[in-house]
Amino acid sequence: MTELNELTLAQARDAIHAKKISATELTQAHIEAVERARSLGAFIAETPEQALDMAKASDARIASGQAGPLEGLPLGVKDLYATKGAHTQACSHILDGFKPVYESTVTANLWRDGAVMLGKLNMDEFAMGSSNETSYYGPVASPWLPPDWSADQARAAASGDKKGLLVPGGSSGGSAAAVAARLCLGATASDTGGSIRQPAAFTGTVGIKPTYGRCSRFGMVAFASSLDQAGPIARTVRDCAILLRSMAGHDAKDTTCVDMPVPDYEKSIGVSLKGRRIGIPKEYRVNGMSDEIDALWLKGIDFMRDAGAEIVDISLPHTKYALPAYYIVAPAEASSNLARYDGVRYGLRVEGRDIADMYERTREKGFGAEVRRRILIGAYVLSAGYYDAYYVRAQKIRTLIRRDFETAFDAGVDAILTPATPSPAFGIGEKTNADPVEMYLNDIFTVTVNMAGLPGIAVPAGLSRDGLPLGLQLIGRPFDEETLFAAGQVIEDAAGRVQLPTRWWE
Ligand code: GLN
């Protein structure tokens, strides 16, 4: 039999329901996989005792015929989600020692359905980044080896500063790496400008950012509240569909969370695309995009056509303003959200001469360079003299971006196909000393989706010349995640599931 941690989430679920394996043995296998993979840096807090307690409770429910949809399935949780009594710091120093007394709604929904928590996953500090290099806990190494690297070379680098290994993407880098390395069956992630889809694309995994309002944000550490959404990363489209069904749903504790029934997303797997219209936006053929990304996109168009979809050329004319507008709106909201970290209420406190001095010292010590940069940009664009020139203008652009999509959907387009990232994964340290804008350019294909509040999925669609994963993105109508799962499955079937890397880190 396949090793237990090599099963997909759906396979593990079916084996548990058929009583072929127990939740406890499945959990034990994953706990051991996590322990053997510490050099990757994917988990920053392991909760094995809690995992085994949860697994035992699952086995009891299975025995009494009360198994939930995720019964006994071990998952990883991004450090951004409040988990009662467990490490919750959004990988920031400023939240040192913070252990919430409450549970986020998304994770509570997962535990309600029987899932098991293995621990907390590394991420960029406050979800700001595209490479998981801004984490207070250090970078995450992608399980994918850089071209021409031997396993020995990689093991040596992983136990050192990890330089030269590949980034898993960010900000949900721990989630993507843990899923690709088979340390958990799936993971929670979050996406403000691409942080689910970009790391999924870099690691050969699947990630979906649902429509804004689909999942509750209660108990998620806020970055930019009008853009943040929860979503899963898993190894197959089906696994993401199963996880999202449990994560989503109305919650009175988040007023932006919509009161709409949650479909059984798994039913969309295998639904035909015959007669569906897939839009191809010409503005996504950006300058400097590598020819292999272009070729991947063309391949994706063929997959859609072969599945019976009609391909239509569309225009999203305001795309070119999306990145600059995002990097005004997101820091503006962040500067406001992060004002709460003052050394008084939770986490780190650095004593000072008086209270103002204590605030300043705490924030200076507690925030990393990227977070400070965002706070400064945010405070600047919201300041009296510049508010109209930057913030108001960015919000207007945001409306125009949303209208671009509405126009396409009104014309009968069911989903839009684009590349997920402009390149395959890059090396750890490769972009951190460069101009920060270099890093921001990674989000070129994903930020528009958050600005418009739409659902987007990234699905592995092939390998680069160097053998690294590349992903395609599908963007859907509001609350039509079902079409994304159906079309995502078409890509997975046509491209074939990517062969994940052998476990060189063990
Ligand atoms: N990379 C983008 C940023 O740094 C998006 C991050 C995210 O989606 N959380 O803001």
Image: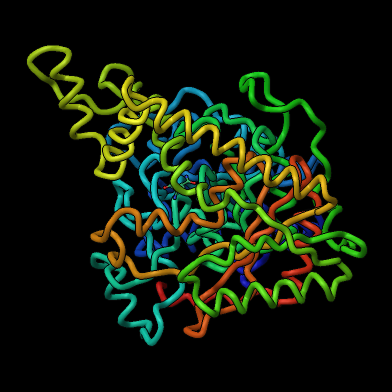
Examine the rendered structure and indicate whether residue 116 appears above or below residue 148.
above
Q: Residue furthest top?
A: 354
Front residue of 288/84: it is 288
Q: Is residue 440 left or right of residue 263?
A: left
Pinpoint residue 157: horizontal percent, then vertical percent: 28, 73
Look at 38% across and 36% down and name the residue there.
89
Look at the image and tell me whether residue 392 can be seen: yes
Examine the rendered structure and indicate whether residue 502 appears above or below residue 72.
below
Q: Residue furthest right?
A: 275
Looking at the figure, which quarter contains the C terminus?
Answer: bottom left
Look at 40% across and 72% down and name the residue there.
505
Pinpoint residue 379: horizontal percent, then vertical percent: 32, 28
Looking at the figure, which quarter contains the N terminus?
Answer: bottom right
Look at 39% across and 44% down and name the residue there.
128
Look at the image and tell me whether residue 1 can be seen: no
Q: Is residue 436 left or right of residue 220?
A: left
Q: How is the image coloured?
A: rainbow
Front residue of 42/276: it is 276
Pinpoint residue 226: horizontal percent, then vertical percent: 55, 31
